[in-house]
Amino acid sequence: MGWPLVWDQGEETAIQSPRGGAKVTWSGPPLMPDGGRDRLHLDLVAAGDRDAEIDRLLALGATWAGAGRHTADDVVLADPDGTGFCLLTPR
């Protein structure tokens, strides 16, 4: 996302937009059983070359989870815990 890391201690991590606002935080393994739906779903847009970003995310541990959730060109990936997110085509 290109957002700076606010903290990363123990199993707790947070990032925040360079413009300020709310922080996005996460920590450790899920506390509740998976109910079949993602507890969180992010729609992201690559700042540069989308194909290069897909390769980078896959190298970091993401996996292919589908395509076309919003449009036929969008890519659905999952993080190492299985939570899905979309890499959208820039407008």
Image (cartoon, rainbow, N blue to C red):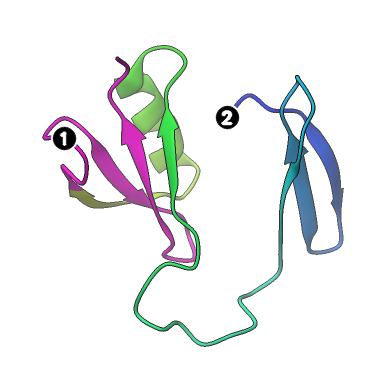
**Mark 1 or 2, closer to the camera:** 1
Inspect the magenta stretch and tell me whether residue 88 lies in it: yes
* Residue found at the very far bottom of the displayed protein: 33
Above or below 22: residue 51: above
Q: Residue under circle 1?
A: 71
- Location of the N terminus (image quadrant): top right
Magenta span: 67-91
Question: Which residue is pictured at 76% across the width and 28% down the height?
Answer: 4
Q: Does residue 59 lie above or below 13 as drawn?
A: above
- Where's residue 22, x and y in %? 76, 40
Q: Is residue 81 left or right of residue 64?
A: right
Q: Which residue is rendered at x = 16% and y = 35% of the image? A: 71
Residue pointed to by mark 2? 1
Q: Quadrant of residue 49?
A: top left
Residue furthest toward the front?
Answer: 21
For the residue marked with disc 2, what is the amino acid? Answer: Met
Amino acid type, residue under disc 1 in the picture: Thr
